Image: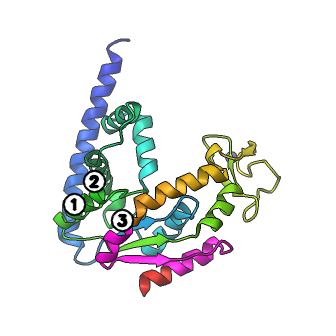
Amino acid sequence: MPITQPLFGACRTIFAFFGTCFNEAGFYLVRTLFWQFRKPRYIILLGPPGSGKGTLATQLAPALRIKAMSTGDVFRREKAANTKFGRQVKAHLADGSLVPDSLTLAIVRRELIRPRYWFGAIEDGFPRTIAQAEQFELLLAKWGVSVEWTVLLDVNDDDLIDRLSNRRTCTNKSCGRTYNLKYERSVEAGICDVCHAPTAQRDDDVPEVISARLRTYREETQPLCNYYQVRNVLASVHPTGDMTKQEVFVLVKAALQG
Ligand SMILES: [Zn+2]
């Protein structure tokens, strides 16, 4: 038995190595042969917690014929699979330091060369800092492209607080579906439609915590907005609290065309 564990690990490393080689070669071919016929599209989504970024990403992806990439999901997946990147991320989070920009960039790059992103991506949760934005710009420049649009979902604080404090989340961790007491109720009150587990309010969805989260968000995002504004690729939309997801989607599509 003791020999199987390292053997398994070694096999996985070798597979990962060949997988990356395949992706690098394939991506190189796609870039040189196909990008002149179909321009890749790199879109960034910015928006406060509760602004519906995740939903927008899933609506926008098929409309633009590219895939959405949630950096949060990628990090969670790497940590769960205990990959080399995953272990590095865990080590940084464990000692209370932030994940360094260079590591984030390396992970994003490795994702972007996967076949699903060969013609672009909608970035949700990245870049977070000016340093990341600059490094991302350099990476894309090496490929001869740049960020096409940065979409800012500019929802006002009262609407967000109203929306988030009415949010209820399925307590089953593997489901995690969210509901809203005002806009999107579950069929049976307090019970998840999908898995029938009870729904509850998350600890950080109470007004005081929400205000603190919004402050952090503004400090982080304002410089990024300026950064993309200067480059003429910032599209701000201002959805109001009573708009449906579909209405927000239409608004964003119009902003991207105009
Ligand atoms: Zn559920």
Q: Is residue 249 magenta?
A: yes
Q: Position of residue 200 (x, y in %)?
A: 72, 45
Q: Residue 202 bears which disc, if any? A: none
Q: Give the colouring mode of the picture.
A: rainbow
Q: Quadrant of residue 69?
A: bottom left
**Pointer 3: residues within 10 angstroms few (<14), some, or many (20+)?**
many
CA distance separating discs 2 and 3: 20 Å
Q: Is residue 41 visible?
A: no
Nearer to us in this view, 233 or 196? 233
Residue at figure coordinates x 31%, y 33% from the top left:
12
Number of numbered discs on residues: 3
Q: What is the magenta range?
A: 224-252
Residue bearing mark 3: 224
Disc with the residue nearer the chain's start (1 vs 3)? 1
**Circle 1 SS class:** helix
Q: Are marks 2 and 1 in contact (CB under 8 Å)?
A: yes
Residue 218 or residue 167, whichever sits in front: 218
Q: Which residue is mark 2?
A: 109
* Residue 9 visible to an observer of this rendering: yes
Name the element at disc 2.
Answer: helix
Tell me what residue is drawn at x 41 percent, y 58 percent.
220
Residue 67, percent from left and from top = 42, 63
Instruction: Assess whether mark 3 and mark 1 are in contact (beta carbons under 8 angstroms).
Output: no
* Residue at 23%, 42% in the rendered image: 18
Residue 98, above or below 12: below
Does residue 52 sit above or below 171 in this rendering? below
Q: Secondary structure at mark 3?
A: helix
Q: Magenta stretch: residue 21 in it? A: no
